[in-house]
Image: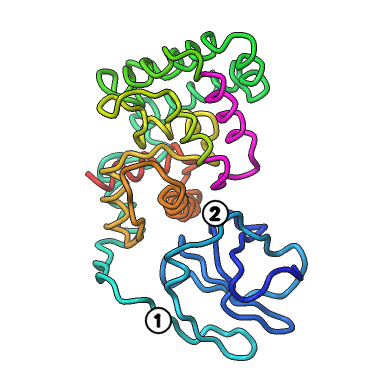
Amino acid sequence: MSAIRVGTYVMHSQRPAWGVGKVFGQSQQHVLVGFSALPAQERFKRMEWRPGLLERAEIRQDSELDSWKVECDSTCHYLGAIEKPRKALKAALWTREQAMERFINKFHGGFPDVWYRSTHRDPRVSQQQTFAARLQPARLRELAESDPRAAGDMIMELLDEPARPLLHLKTELPRLKEAFENVRALPAFLIALADILEAERPSVKTFEAYVAAIAGFGVPAKRSPLTWPIVTAIPAVAQPLQHIFVKATPTTKAAAGLGFELKFNRKPNWQTYERVLGMSNNLLEFIKPRSGVDMFDVQAFIVAIAE
């Protein structure tokens, strides 16, 4: 950690869900790090100064972290922070416990509820199992070279779930199908998809490369597959412990209700996705003792509380 000092952007090696942080204080034994993806009351962490605890992040700037003026004492105890003036955030409408009550009002048995499992969780788990059996990253790379059209057809077949579709059958799924008709762009997409699935955790490098590969299909703007649902659907199905399916309206409503600041941009981008993952991982920790398992359950929780 010798290369890490005040001002360095970092990731916590054991808490990747915290996202990117910035070092605001440093002493011989401790550092103070702020993580923008965490709720305001939890974002500043005083940690022991030891090798392997923090890793340098891949970004060069973060407007949110850079806006903070943080005060700490000589031993890195947090004293306070002042942010650049901006529009005040609305207070949270519910606690997580109150949000859980909203979820149970819809699914009376919670996550083990038979109706919840049959209409929400089980279809997603079935898709994930199919993906794992047919389209592991090594297979995606092989098909990118030998038969990219076959890989595209398998992905479309996987997502075409009429009983409980992840993508809208009349709008979003046709957009992706039209994009896949550009077979020359499929190999780059399949490789970018393999990269994002092979990564130890989501990162700006793999996510932005994946978004760029989708943009590379060259579909006209009005029919573009560059939407949050389309961009996040496949990683979410393939790796429900790492990635989450994002629909703009319920995600922003749930974030506002719970007091998370997403700075949501409707164009898929890493900064927004990182914040969505921060909120989602926070919720996953909350629902695990309540029989929640992964991001399939988090996404269903978000949709239910946003209704």
Indicate the position of residue 198 as horizontal and vertical percent values: 64, 34
Quarter residue 260 falls in: bottom left
Could you tell me the amino acid type at mark 1? Answer: Ile
Question: Which residue, given by chain and number where applicable, does mark 2 sit on?
Answer: 17
Task: Answer few, some or many: residues within 10 Å of disc 1's Cα (few below 14, many 20 plus, some between 14 and 19).
Answer: few
Which span of residues is magenta-colored? 186-207
Of the residues under marks 2 and 1, which one precedes in the sequence?
Answer: 2
Q: Quadrant of the N terminus?
A: bottom right
Whether residue 37 is situated above or below residue 115 in the rendered picture: below
Whether residue 131 is situated above or below residue 250 in the rendered picture: above
Quarter residue 163 falls in: top left
- Element under label 2? helix
Indicate the position of residue 237 as horizontal and vertical percent values: 48, 29
| Left or right of residue 106: residue 161 | right
- Element under label 1? strand
Q: Quadrant of the C terminus?
A: top left
Q: State which mark lies toward you, 2 or 1.
A: 1
- Residue drawn at x 27%, y 49% is 102
| Left or right of residue 215: residue 105 | left
Majority SS type along the magenta span: helix
The residue furthest left is: 307
Q: Is residue 191 magenta?
A: yes
- Residue drawn at x 69%, y 84% is 27
| Left or right of residue 237: residue 89 | left
Quarter residue 116 falls in: top left
Could you tell me the amino acid type at mark 2? Answer: Ala
Question: Which residue, given by chain and number where applicable, does mark 1 sit on?
Answer: 82
Pick the front one: 203 or 45: 203
- Residue drawn at x 43%, y 23% is 217
Whether residue 243 is situated above or below residue 64 in the rendered picture: above
Indicate the position of residue 288 as horizontal and vertical percent values: 50, 49
